[in-house]
Amino acid sequence: MSGAMQLGFEGMPKPLRSVTPAKLDTFDLCPRRFRFVYVDRPAPSRGAPWAHTGIGSAVHAVLRGIWDLAPSSRSVDEVLRDLRAMWPTVGFRDLAQSRRALAIMSEHLAAYVTEHVDFNAEPRGIERTVGAPYGDLAISGRIDRVDELPDGSLVVIDYKTGRAVPTDDEARASMQLAVYAVAVERTFRARCARVELHHIPSGVIASAEITEQTRERQMRRAAATADDIDRAKERMADGVHPDEAYPTRVSPACGHCDFWAHCADGRQVALKDPWFAVPGESMR
């Protein structure tokens, strides 16, 4: 008789599988990248820092910092001061490029804050970790912002700083946003009615209503990806070569992957310069 049976554990439910939107999205984009980030230990070294990643982190930090101030101290000028203080110093071609990008992003951020941020409002959550069980999944994630609508329902807000302008269709089709919505409902004990992508450079807000059908469809996708992750782990444990268990999905994204140097398949795509996505630069 096994130790588990002796202890009376026979028939106990299987433990929940922990997933985050970031893990699910990473595996869907490229299983090889997923392995480099979440499986291999020690993890492979990353390439040079990307300027646009640092810019995105700075903008997110600035938008979070608005709500650390008293309402009377919140202003566009304060936001721009914070952006200058948090501006990254790596990844740019030179100082002139960094300064030009800062000027462009400052203009974008000032326009977004002026049009879309109510300094007197208090969001329900800022960079809040949320989580919930769903079937055999234990989902969790960290969201940029949660707002409350007049009827008491909630809105998940995700900031975007890249060049691609999101659409309502993209918000509607996003598994990541649907998973966040499920976790927000459980954490805040209130209905999540809508998800929004706030694109800072353009000021565009792409939104989608969250229905029961949306939840079910996207959570089925999440469970299917979690199954794929489990199968890849099992295959490698059974002796399948790691590169076969976690294949590369070659795409243009390979050209700006942190692990380009470690992936022969990904190196079919030319490596981008660290500053290729800096505001004001061409996307060559």
Image (cartoon, rainbow, N blue to C red):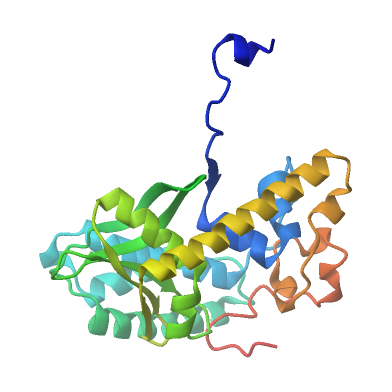
Residue drawn at the location 57% of the way across and 55% of the way down = 223
Residue 166 in view (yes/no): no
Residue 129 in view (yes/no): yes
Residue drawn at the location 63% of the way across and 90% of the way down = 282
Q: Nearer the viewer, residue 271 or 39?
A: 39
Left or right, 176 with reference to 76: right
Residue drawn at the location 29% of the way across and 61% of the way down = 65
Locate the N terminus by quadrant: top right
| Residue 94 percent coordinates (x, y) | 61, 77
Instruction: Give the answer, above or below, for where 8 lies relative to 93.
Output: above
| Residue 127 percent coordinates (x, y) | 35, 56
| Residue 171 percent coordinates (x, y) | 44, 77
Q: Quadrant of residue 25?
A: bottom right
Instruction: Give the answer, above or below, for where 15 lies relative to 100.
Output: above
Instruction: Give the answer, above or below, for where 154 lies relative to 92.
Output: above
Left or right, 237 with reference to 68: right
Q: Quadrant of residue 259?
A: bottom right
Residue drawn at the location 81% of the way across and 77% of the way down = 270
Locate the C terminus by quadrant: bottom right
| Residue 92 percent coordinates (x, y) | 61, 74
Instruction: Give the answer, above or below, for where 150 lies relative to 224.
Output: below
